[in-house]
Image (spheres, helix red, strand yellow):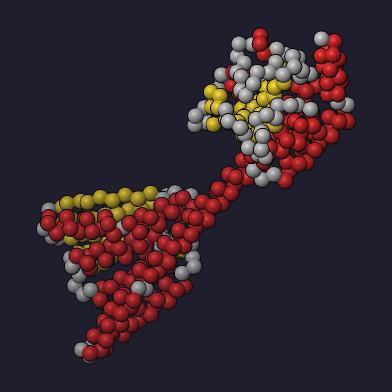
Amino acid sequence: MMKTQLKQKKVLSKRHLSNDEVEEILIYFSTSILEKEAEQDVFWDLVKNVIARLGFVDCVIYKINKRTRKLVQRAAHGPKNPKRKKILKPLEIPLGSGITGFVATTGVAERIGDTRLDPRYIIDDEERRSELAVPIIINNKVVGVIDCEHPMKDYFTEQDFRIVKAIASICAIKLKQLEAQKAVQQKEYKLLQTRQQLAELKVQAIRAQMNPHFVFNALNAVQHFITINDKKNALRFLSAFSKLVRLYLKNLEKDTIDLFQEIAVVEQYLKLQKLRYEGIFEYEITLPEDEPSSIQVPALIVQLMIEEAVENLAKNRLAGKLRISIALPSEHHVAVIVDIAIRQSGKILTKLETRYTNEVANWADHINLLKKVREYSITTSKEVIQNKDITHYRTQVLLPIL
């Protein structure tokens, strides 16, 4: 009995640290975790290099799993860690259960002198008499718990209590930093992904504008006019085609464009397609009466809207009128309305409606990506209006003025 008491006193006296030693431990931990790039490395550094310096024989760090609402063992020093960075039979504790689970719920650190007197105590690998549980708190929320145990009664001192709470605070600061870095990395990755998708979509749009089939048909149309000795239409077509190609190339790299420059591109396109699909459609462009000198809008949206509308008419071989209206409902937005008016039977109208809905997929994807990557305020609407024997397929987009 006397030997046990002497041994206990000897251990206790060994564990009392001077202020310099405490400061050294805290500085060591603060410096050591600066280079850590993952929370798991922070946890293992804490239990292996800091807790061990305090002379603790057992320490486990728990992290809260938000989905299961349980504490999960993430790092350990002592019997739970027989191999490097490996926990023997990892334990999961529901929030509120045991001393550790209770501390995770309250956010208040506890020092238990005799676990046999505390009904909350849960035995992990073996029963121990003393326990020290300190929460790791980020933004006033408990994210984990540092849990230390010892087989001796009243083993943990007030000094231990203060040191572990200080370590938990330093740990929380580092984890918060890692969370912020992870959030930035995820945001940058998503932004990069979205930009890549946006670039691919732009390439698809350019390919659609300048695809070999379109170029071949354009040149074939010129050849046709020359063959029938229609020099006037041949020159008109060639002039419109060359201007269109020049405008496409000029605006290739732009994310934003002056609306009236884009309308100029659209007009060249419509001139070309009207000559190519003679008799298929007529078009009309209405601009605001008080036309501003410049309105910057996201590029390609207006072009894609109108090109897809024309392709719908051409593919369905339907005669119709295409009306493009530009309005300024506010100083921050511009409204672009594309209206296809067709005089046809209900059967063919159903075909056009289906075709039109399917064809605008790229246009819709382009808008969704712009809203995601640029956070543009863009709204769209579609409606079908039946007036006697004429049906209007109307699409409207409200674009931000940039």
Tell me where residue 110 appears, x and y as whole percent: 69, 18
Looking at this view, is 6 or 306 the one in front?
Answer: 6
157 left or right of 186 in image: right
State the image quarter where residue 301 is shown: bottom left
* Residue depicted at 54% across the width and 52% down the height: 189
Residue 39 seen? no
- Name above or below for residue 170 compared with residue 397: above
- Name above or below for residue 163 compared with residue 324: above
Tell me where residue 188 appears, x and y as whole percent: 56, 51
Looking at this view, is 119 or 222 the one in front?
Answer: 119
Residue 309 seen? yes
* Residue depicted at 33% across the width and 71% down the height: 269
Looking at this view, is 309 or 102 the one in front?
Answer: 102
* Residue depicted at 44% across the width and 63% down the height: 200
> Quick one: quadrant of the N terminus?
top right
213 left or right of 31 in image: left
- Name above or below for residue 154 compared with residue 231: above
Tell me where residue 342 appears, x and y as whole percent: 18, 60
Tally the numbered discs. 0
Tell me where residue 156 appears, x and y as whole percent: 76, 19
* Residue depicted at 83% across the width and 24% down the height: 15
292 left or right of 350 in image: right
State the image quarter where residue 322 is shown: bottom left
